[in-house]
Image (cartoon, helix red, strand yellow):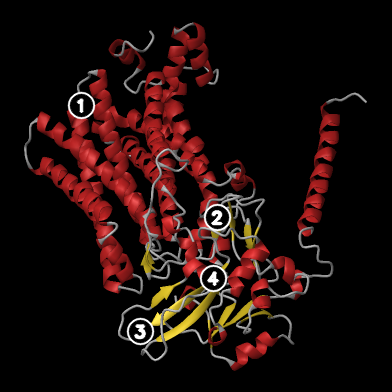
């Protein structure tokens, strides 16, 4: 076949279309591979987290479990989840807050009951916001809200520009120094897509953390939301957080 | 936890907040784009608003804008964890992201406005140099002329007409470029230090101030290097515009401050404390006093008093340099200041700048000097004072 201009365009056009189609098919296959969860349909779920302040004893098991499960760098300052200790003294303008090692080793005793103050622990993690300000600002869409409500990061696409870190009101994101890409709690996506719960909820000795599926009518989350006085963090920012706290004090930021 | 970093923390920070994410390189980004936008606005005063006195600085302003614009994306590239992926912003831009549009705004401004306007303005002279020279120089100018040697009065008149239209389009483009940079910060609702609709406007006017001051200083320095007398009416007019832009900018920033102090939302005490402690030097001393009130007062003095040429020159160069330092401090206070406090409003961290590191002081200094080197090249290639004059005045340029 002689290759005149018309032939070249025809052959070249077909080649382009087929390689593009094959490329996107391959991408689709590869994208599904890490979770390898046959039967999991993102559209069937809408994940949320329930955190009960009254039940948290500050043992730090959740922080340790999360670091181990998700290969989070141990130091210096990288946390997908951490625990804060609040000491609210009515005579002071601000609460005293600490989180040594993010609560990884638990909390050495510092305050005593009956000193006229309130003391409690606040587990923190990505709030899996439905209107998440972090995904809004990502310049390439490398971080996104999955159809099942989990806020995820595509590490193969992230530029490492850190705009999302600036946009998260809760301080939930960090740059993984090994990949130079952003990382955050992904609700143990590799577990929940297989029908398991998150690592932090799995190890919590008091059941202070619990994963919920708002699309499952039988899930406990519905009863939890109905029977408790629920708060979300920084509600005024309208991020539609799906991390629901029971017993959250007004002093918590 | 890493104790060496923790000593920098006062009060409580969320653990992931201890390390700052945006460094001095991100301070340079709005600073450099601001100089570009400001220099272009000054040039457009000649072309669109027919301010004749500014004509000697017209081309210099455009070349300054281009030199800085070429460097503008470099600090961003250097800062990225994966610079090799940055082209994805062009291929798959996330339309809800303010940052995603930067590439397009930048390209439009670079190719659609600045390069085209400079080319049209210089085309006649480029062709002339091409035709009057031989060897590699003729080749170079032939390429710059894109091989077209038409220098008829009709074609030059057409250049002029298109150039005028381009400048008219260029003004909103310059406003867009820098107002947009302000929006990148102003639209972050998580950060009360940034989140204000005033941010794009304040960025824009401070850009105009820095750009005019930049061109004023560069014009004086270039004239001094060339040992050519400075056109005083031109310099006086630049200084006058700088003063007026400064007054508007200062008022807007004052309004922003007043608004914050009067509203005093939950973040105010934290931010107020930060300004009085960690940001005191860069905000109160450098930005407001030495980079704002003093140069503004000095410029104001030249408007109300009859001063000698020497005294005015001294004032202009001092006020220009102080202004440039003040606007740099303003960018610093926005970018770095916005990361020094915790979003819990319960604590503060410190910015530790490296020196010869990827995002340290040294690369920042190199990036700041780079546009001046590029400008020097442009001045050799496209002398703003006309080809013949340049040859006569500058023995460094080949005849």
Disc 4 vs disc 2: Cβ atoms closer than 8 Å? Answer: no
Q: Position of residue B14 (x, y in %)?
A: 46, 67
Corner quadrant of residue B355: top left
Please, is residue B375 above or below residue B321 in the view? above
Q: Earlier in the sequence, mark 4 or mark 3?
A: 3
Between marks 4 and 1 in the image, the one whose residue lies nearer the viewer = 4
Q: Are marks 4 and 3 on the same chain?
A: yes
Q: Which of the two residues, B370 or B45, is positioned nearer the viewer here? A: B370
Residue assigned mark 3: A89
Towards the viewer: A171 or B142: A171
Say which mark, if any, is on residue A253.
none
Q: Chain of mark 3?
A: A
Q: Say which element carries label 1.
A: loop
Residue in the image at 41% along x and 36% along y? B367
Looking at the rendered structure, the secondary structure element under dot 4 is: loop
Parent chain of label 2: A
How crowded pointer 3 is (Cα within 10 Å; few <14, some 14-19, many 20+) is rated as some
Closest to the camera, between mark 4 and mark 2, is: 4
In space, the residues marked 3 and 1 are separated at their CA atoms by: 68 Å
């Amino acid at each position: 076949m002689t290759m005149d201009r018309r032939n070249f365009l025809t052959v070249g056009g077909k080649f382009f279309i087929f390689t593009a189609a094959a490329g996107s098919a391959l991408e689709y296959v590869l994208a599904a591979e890490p979770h390898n969860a046959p039967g999991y349909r993102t559209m069937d779920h809408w994940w949320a987290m329930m955190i009960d302040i009254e039940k948290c004893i500050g043992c730090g098991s959740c922080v340790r479990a999360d670091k181990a499960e998700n290969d989070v760098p141990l130091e210096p300052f990288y946390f997908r989840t951490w625990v804060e200790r609040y000491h609210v003294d009515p005579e002071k303008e601000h609460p005293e807050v600490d989180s040594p090692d993010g609560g990884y080793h638990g909390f050495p005793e510092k305050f005593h009951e009956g000193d006229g103050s309130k003391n409690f622990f606040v587990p923190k993690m990505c709030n899996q916001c439905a209107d998440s300000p972090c995904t809004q600002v990502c310049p390439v869409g490398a971080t996104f809200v999955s159809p099942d409500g989990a806020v995820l990061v595509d590490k193969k696409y992230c530029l490492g520009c850190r705009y999302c870190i600036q946009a998260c009101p809760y301080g939930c994101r960090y740059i993984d120094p090994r990949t130079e890409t952003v990382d955050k709690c992904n609700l143990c996506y590799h577990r929940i897509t297989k029908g398991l719960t998150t690592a932090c909820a799995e190890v919590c000795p008091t059941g202070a953390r619990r994963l919920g599926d708002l699309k499952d009518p039988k899930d406990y989350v519905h009863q939890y939301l109905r029977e408790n006085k629920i708060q979300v963090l920084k509600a005024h920012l309208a991020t539609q957080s799906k991390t629901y706290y029971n017993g959250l004090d007004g002093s918590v930021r | 936890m890493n104790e060496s970093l923790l000593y920098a923390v006062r009060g409580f920070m969320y653990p992931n907040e201890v390390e700052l994410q945006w460094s001095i390189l991100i301070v340079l980004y709005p600073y450099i784009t601001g100089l570009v936008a400001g220099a272009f606005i000054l040039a457009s005063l000649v072309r669109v608003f027919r301010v004749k006195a500014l004509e000697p600085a017209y081309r210099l302003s455009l070349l300054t804008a281009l030199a800085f614009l070429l460097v503008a994306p470099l600090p961003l590239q250097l800062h990225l964890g994966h610079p090799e992926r940055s082209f994805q912003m062009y291929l798959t831009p996330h339309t809800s992201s303010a940052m995603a549009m930067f590439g397009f705004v930048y390209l439009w401004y670079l190719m659609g406005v600045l390069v085209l306007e400079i080319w049209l303005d210089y085309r006649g002279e480029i062709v002339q140099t091409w035709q009057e020279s031989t060897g590699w120089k003729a080749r170079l100018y032939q390429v710059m002329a894109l091989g077209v040697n038409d220098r008829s009065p009709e074609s030059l008149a057409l250049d002029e007409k298109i150039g005028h239209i381009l400048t008219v389009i260029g003004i909103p483009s310059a406003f867009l470029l820098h107002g947009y940079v302000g929006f990148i910060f102003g639209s972050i609702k998580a950060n009360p230090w940034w989140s204000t609709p005033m941010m794009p406007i304040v960025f824009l006017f401070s850009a105009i101030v820095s750009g005019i001051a930049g061109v004023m200083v560069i014009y004086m320095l270039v004239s001094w290097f060339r040992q050519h007398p400075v056109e005083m009416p031109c310099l006086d007019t630049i200084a006058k515009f700088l003063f007026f832009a400064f007054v508007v900018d200062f008022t807007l920033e004052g309004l922003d401050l007043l608004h914050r102090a009067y509203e005093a939302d939950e973040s105010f005490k934290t931010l107020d404390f930060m300004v009085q402690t960690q940001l005191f030097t860069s905000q109160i001393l450098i930005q407001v006093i030495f980079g704002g009130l003093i140069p503004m007062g000095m410029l104001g003095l030249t408007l109300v008093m009859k001063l000698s040429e020497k005294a005015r020159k001294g004032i202009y160069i001092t006020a220009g340099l102080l202004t440039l330092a003040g606007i740099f401090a303003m960018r610093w206070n926005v970018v770095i200041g916005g990361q020094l406090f915790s979003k819990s409003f319960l604590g503060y961290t410190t910015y530790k700048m490296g020196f010869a590191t990827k995002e340290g002081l040294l690369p920042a200094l190199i990036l700041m000097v780079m546009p001046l080197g590029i400008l020097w090249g442009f001045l050799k290639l496209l002398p703003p004072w006309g080809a013949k004059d340049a040859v006569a005045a500058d023995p460094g340029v080949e005849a």
